Structure formats: C-alpha cells, structure tokens
Amino acid sequence: MRFAVSTLGLPGASLSEAVELAVRHGVDGLELRLHEDMPLDADPRDAGVEVVSICGYVRIAEAGADGPVIAALREQLVLADRFGALGVRVFPGGSDVEAALRRLEAVAGEAEARVLVETHDHLPTGAAVAALLDRFGRPEVAGAIWDVLHPWRNGEEPAATFAALAPHLAYVQIKDAVGTTPRPMGQGEVPLDVVGGLLRGYPGWLSLEWEKAWHPEVEALGEVIPGAREWVRSVVGSG
C-alpha cells in the first residue's frame, strides 16, 4: 500500500508544512497542487515523503492555440522531474481530442515524468479518457488518473471505469462526498465498497483528495487522514 494526500486539503500552507503533516500522519506521498500561496520551500524526499504528481491546471483538450498549453505543460514537467514525480496531472478542460493529441506529441520525450489525464470535466469517464490515451498510444508519455467520484457521478459504474483505465492507470484519487461536498471516507455517497473491491491488492498509489481549498467549511485534512488511511488498509489491503 502506498498512501498519499493532496495539498488541496491545505490551502495557504507551504510545502514544508505539508511535508510536516505527512510525516506526522504516516503519509507516504503528496500530490502537489500548484498555486501561488504554496512556497516550494522543501524537498519532501528529504523527509522520506515522495511526490506523486504535480497537480497543475493545464487543460489539455481545451479549444484555442496550442502554444500556451504546451508551454505551461513543459514548465510543469520540469518541476515534476525536479521532485521525481510520476507526472503532471492535467484536466481535459474541453473536448478537443485532436488538440490534446497534438499537445501530448509536442512534449513527448522531453521529461521522465508523464502527462496524467484525470477523469474530470469534459472527459469525466474512464471510457472517455481511455479513448484519448488509446489513440495517443504512448504509455511512456501519458497515462490516466482515476478520480473515483467523477466517473460515477456521470453514470459510469466503477467496474467499467477500472476496466477502461487499467492499461493506462498511473494512480487513483480516493474520496467520498455528498453531491460534490467532501465527506470523510464512508460518510458520503460514493460506492466505496465497490471501489475497494476493485482495487484490492492494487500496487499503485492511492491518494486522498480532500478539497478543503474549495470547501473551507469541511474538516481539517489532519482530521480525515486517519480514516482514509484505515480505509486503504482494511478495504484495499497491502497487496
């Protein structure tokens, strides 16, 4: 089991503060959300904490000129390599698959880190993200992130999502929610028993995305980590 959390749950924190929380709660890795109020003032690896991904907001399939998208993606891939991350999380941000393919090809071979497309917004299902990655056909360059909420909310059963993404899956973002409001694991509507069964023995990263940055009224990240870590241990298992 490799358990990570997203710094989306720590609005206003520095990277060193995020690392301190991870160490205190026995977290193995961090998803680093890029935003202007998070100073990159530490290297998590010095504390034994890995960087799973850089969570920027590049929209790989948005309409418009390729240049700005490619430039932002290159900048974030450099940062991902700096921290030894698996890759850079990107949103679809649109449905222009042809543009997405051009942009992926433009950065191919430029970094060790990969471009990781999340099941989100205009391509919310495993089937949609897998169709893009199947067409691109270069798993060493691009992969997928399964956010367990969005495909399910868009009518795709977890088993179908997992089957579609399995050849491309880089890691899984776990969460529970009522509507779109985050809830501690097991207190929301997401079919976590089904997700857990599909992921039993899964050897990759499972990362808690606790969206306190967007929902400041919810519990502090440190309060929900123990329950999420226990869910990973008891439901998914250690592999």
Image (spheres, grey):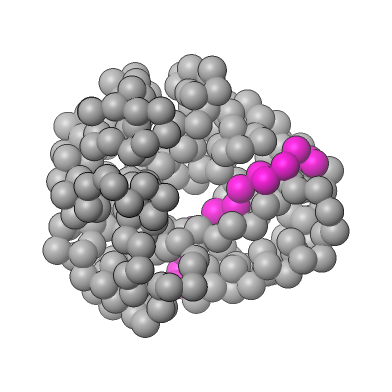
Residue 15's spot in the image, x, y percent? 34, 73
* Front-lying residue, 33 or 179: 179
Q: Quadrant of the C terminus?
A: top left
The image quadrant that residue 155 belongs to is top right
Does residue 92 show up magenta in the picture?
Answer: yes
Residue in the picture at 41% in, 78% down: 40
What is the x, y in percent for residue 104? 74, 54
Comparing 139 with 57, the one in front is 57
Q: Is residue 27 rendered to the left or right of residue 141?
A: left
* Foreground residue among 112 and 125: 125
111 relative to 88, above or below: below
Which residue sits at x=70%, y=31%? Answer: 131
Quadrant housing the N terminus: top left
Q: Is residue 184 visible?
A: yes
Q: Which residue is outermost to the front?
A: 217
Q: On the rendered structure, is 134 left or right of 86?
A: right
Query: x%, y% of residue 233?
Result: 19, 38
* Span of residues in magenta: 83-97
